[in-house]
Amino acid sequence: MFIETEDTPNPATLKFLPGRSVTGDARPVDFGDADVAAGRSELATALFGQPNVRRVFLGGDFVSVTKSDDISWGDLKPVVLGTITTFFESGRPVLSGTQSAPEHDVAPEDAEVVSRIQDLLDTRVRPAVAGDGGDIAFRGYKDGVVYLAMQGACSGCPSSRATLKHGVENMLRHYVPEVASVEQVED
């Protein structure tokens, strides 16, 4: 099995492309630690079995791994490649059970605005950040403020705040006049 790797804007994160579906039609899943991954993904759990893996993000056709500062990619990359290869060769499913999108309380009068926001995020923003090994997740809308969480390689990335403020906020304000600002929240 040949797995390609790509750098991301976050120097602590590499994107691994196994050449096959990872989450398939399921939504991307971000695991901030081994406890969150336990029982939800054998692949993420196996990756967290490496002492210097700090975050695992599973996208439609890629896996992003964030390392600790204590190790170089030169030392960790072969171990991660081996773990991913072994997992996919086993034929086991990447995700266990059903993965549902988190629900958000949205005021009934904001439902149409939120629908437009989510459509723009799904069609214009998420594909771009997936290219960098991450995702952006809608976490709420209230009084003109859109709350978003950066995931995968985008979580902790030095340029994530600029992406939100200068890219996402400007686009949302242009297409959805009800949007006043965008705020980043942590998952």
Image (cartoon, rainbow, N blue to C red):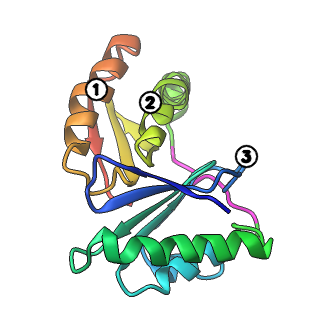
Name the quadrant containing residue 177: top left
Task: Give the class, few, some or many, for how many residues have Cα within 10 Å of label 2's Cα (few <14, many ≥20).
Answer: some
Q: Position of residue 164 (x, y in %)?
A: 27, 35
Q: Position of residue 111 (x, y in %)?
A: 55, 28
The residues bearing labels 3 and 2 have C-alpha atoms spaced at a distance of: 18 Å
For badge 3, the amino acid type reads Asp
Task: Give the class, few, some or many, for how many residues have Cα within 10 Å of label 3's Cα (few <14, many ≥20).
Answer: few
Residue at image coords 68%, 63%: 1
Residue at image coords 32%, 58%: 186
Secondary structure beneath dot 1 equals helix
102 or 158, which is in the foreground? 158
- Left or right of 114, for residue 180: left
Q: Which residue is mark 3?
A: 25
The residues bearing labels 1 and 2 have C-alpha atoms spaced at a distance of: 9 Å
Q: Tags 3 and 2 in contact by the CB under 8 Å rule?
A: no
Q: Which residue is mark 2?
A: 125
For badge 1, the amino acid type reads Gly
- Left or right of 133, for residue 81: right
Secondary structure beneath dot 3 equals loop
Residue at image coords 55%, 25%: 123
Q: Which mark is residue 135?
A: none
Q: Earlier in the sequence, mark 3 or mark 2?
A: 3
Name the quadrant containing residue 3: bottom right
Range of the magenta residues?
98-105
Secondary structure beneath dot 2 equals helix
48 or 39, which is in the foreground? 48
